[in-house]
Image (cartoon, rainbow, N blue to C red):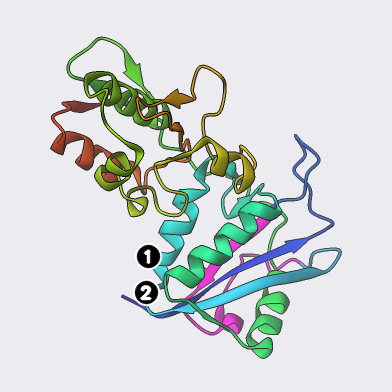
Amino acid sequence: MEQGILYVVYNEWIKNPKTGKMPYKIGITTKTVDARYYGLGLKMPGTFKALFAYKFNDCARAENVIRGLFEQYCVNGEWFEINEDQIELVKKNCENMGGIPTTDETQEEILEDSEKDYSLPRRKKERDRSRYKINGMEQTYGKSPLVKEVIKSYITKNPDVTLKELQKMFPKKTQGSVGVIDTRENARNRYRNERHYTTENDIITLKTGEKIVICHEWGISNIGNFIEKAKELGFDITKQESN
């Protein structure tokens, strides 16, 4: 466990060449910011701006949680193509994990250090593309489809189950920030249909009349939590070798 700072910065001059969108850098430092080293120390055009920074007693854990939640939006290394709502989720997660907002002086240090960074790391971070089998069946699933299939299968076998019971089986902390299962209304009003499977075929109507949806934001940092819960319910889930 090591103290450190997790921060989010951006530079309007830096764009993803494939999409033309501006990514945000989610970085950490466990030393003074001035002590960080970025290779050749090239000066970047434009101005880096800090959105926020939080101090943690266990900075590595905070970084793993945040990056895991937004793994699918990683465009290169520490750079993530996320929108305003997702940025707010980063902030809320930092607060929920006990992060302490840093001082203006610390943020200035972060900005000065960021100007020495490259626009995007040259080597793209390798993503975990593991697939899984359920109960020995031939078909394999990625992380998010696995979650959807398990929950749909459980509801089929237990048609009288309620939303409250499902959320007790799969508590919010299983996923991390959004939760595993939510109401159709909440997914639309609070998350703008960006965090859940919300097509007509994916909306599930329980016997109680409740319309529910399943979160699709799963990565290497939280899928293990779900698999553990699924196994407690009798599902046999095996990980296949990734290609």
Judged left or right of residue 170, residue 91 is: right
Count of numbered tags: 2
Relative image position of residue 65 (x, y in whole percent):
42, 57
> Which residue is pictured at 57% across the width and 22% down the height?
199
The residue tagged 2 is 58
Within the image, what quadrant is residue 96 found in?
bottom left
Judged left or right of residue 31, residue 231 is: left
Instruction: Give neighbour class at mark 2: few <14, some 14-19, many 20+ (Cα, 10 Å).
Output: some
> Which residue is pictured at 57% across the width and 66% down the height?
91
Q: Amino acid at mark 2?
A: Asp
Relative image position of residue 148 (x, y in whole percent):
38, 27
Element under disc 2: loop
Relative image position of residue 230 (x, y in whole percent):
22, 35
Magenta span of residues? 24-42
Relative image position of residue 156 (x, y in whole percent):
28, 19
Judged left or right of residue 43, residue 163 is: left
Q: Mark 2 touching mark 1, by CB under 8 A?
A: yes
> Looking at the rendering, in which quadrant would you find the C terminus?
top left
The residue tagged 1 is 61
Q: Nearer the viewer, residue 187 or 51?
A: 187
Determine whether 96 is above or below 122 in the image: below
